[in-house]
Amino acid sequence: MYEALLQVMTAQIGTGGPLDRVLAGHEDDPGPSGLALRLLGTVHRLVLERRAEDLAAYYPSVGGHFDLEAALPALLSVLDEQHDAVAEGLARPPQTNEVGRGAALVGALLRLSATDHPVRLVELGASAGLNLRADHFRCSGSGGAWGPPDSPVVLADVWKGVPTPADRQLRVVERVGCDPSPIDPTSRQGQVLLTAYVWPDQRSRLERLRGAFEVAARVPVEVHRMGAGEMVASLQLQPGRCTVVWHSVMWQYVDPAEQALATTHVERLAAQGSTDAPFVHVYLEPMRRSPGAAHEFVVAVEQWPPGPTGRDPVIGTTSGHGLPVTWER
């Protein structure tokens, strides 16, 4: 649906119409800023909030049926009539708290001997902290199934490649995250905002998100309003526990100074990692494995004391929404 809309919307650029007016000032936004997702996510939110009734008829997320020819003029009308609301949304980064990425986190942690310790899970750019509850999701695939059989979030057949040791235990004893604009997933307002950044015709993602709201209602998580650098700077390792810092598809939204601060303190914690107080850095981010290579969404692990995986931190690949994960080791 979004692919079709964006293809026809490009013909509107340069015509002086409502799309040009709402995008004014964003002409030089870099690709990683997610301008298209910010635009369509903001419009989807207006649909979910019943502020775009004519357009809602073409959005499957609210019971509509997508029709490209009819949807385009309705969308342009929303951009024209609700210019200020759309412009405000464009100023905010996407809040794509994609639940599918939890499969990468769980699969990675099950591979690490360090997580025989109770786990302190820290997420950077956590949004609503849904994936801080990933151990309450049911995941399955190569290696078997793991997680509560009655979980409302079922990520079925999502592990490919090298089998995941699904017979291992994982005990998360602390969950904390940070985000510049944290969202409460137990509130109606928060749920609407998170739903807005799921593409309206992707029913499986919408179902996963609704299941994650159920998990969030019973598993408390603390997400602080702060940047990644400040969050990592505040961390200290704890004896008898494994401290895991995790993030997914958020690094591109962090400015270079904040990236440098976070990296400095990851290195500090790495230098302090010990057998009794191990430190693990897990991430799912787009990257090139070598200069000139294509971008991939990789799942990577760095751990201290070092594990048997060698210098290459990449242990698998996935899609931007986290499913499936193809494990390389």
Image (cartoon, rainbow, N blue to C red):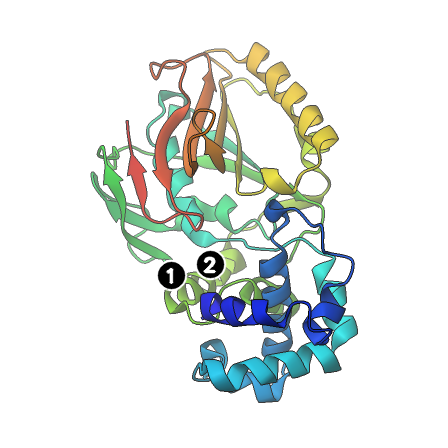
In the displayed structure image, the side of residue 318 where residue 49 appears, left or right:
right
Contact flag, marks 2 and 1 (Cβ < 8 Å): yes
Q: Secondary structure at mark 2?
A: helix
> Mark 2 or mark 1: which comes first in sequence?
1
Q: Position of residue 244 (x, y in %)?
A: 51, 29
Q: Position of residue 242 (x, y in %)?
A: 49, 24
> Residue drawn at (69%, 76%), measured in percent from left and top?
79
Q: Which mark is residue 80?
A: none
In the displayed structure image, the side of residue 80 where residue 246 appears, left or right:
left
How many residues crowd mark 1 within 10 Å: few (<14), some (14–19), many (20+)? some
Distance from disc 2 to disc 1, alpha carbons, whole Å, reads: 7 Å
Q: Would you say residue 53 is visible in this rendering?
A: yes
Q: Secondary structure at mark 1?
A: loop
Q: Which residue carries the number 1 mark?
A: 152
Q: Quadrant of the C terminus?
A: top left
> Residue drawn at (39%, 69%), measured in percent from left and top?
203
Q: Reply above or below: 120 against 21.
A: above
In this rendered view, identify the residue nearer to me: 241 or 65.
65
The image quarter containing residue 167 is top left
In this rendered view, identify the residue nearer to me: 67 or 114.
67
Q: Position of residue 116 (x, y in %)?
A: 37, 25
How many residues crowd mark 2 within 10 Å: few (<14), some (14–19), many (20+)? many
Q: Which mark is residue 212?
A: 2
> Residue drawn at (53%, 43%), measured in percent from left and top?
249
Residue type at mark 1?
Pro
In this rendered view, identify the residue nearer to me: 37 or 96.
37
In this rendered view, identify the residue nearer to me: 309 or 188.
309
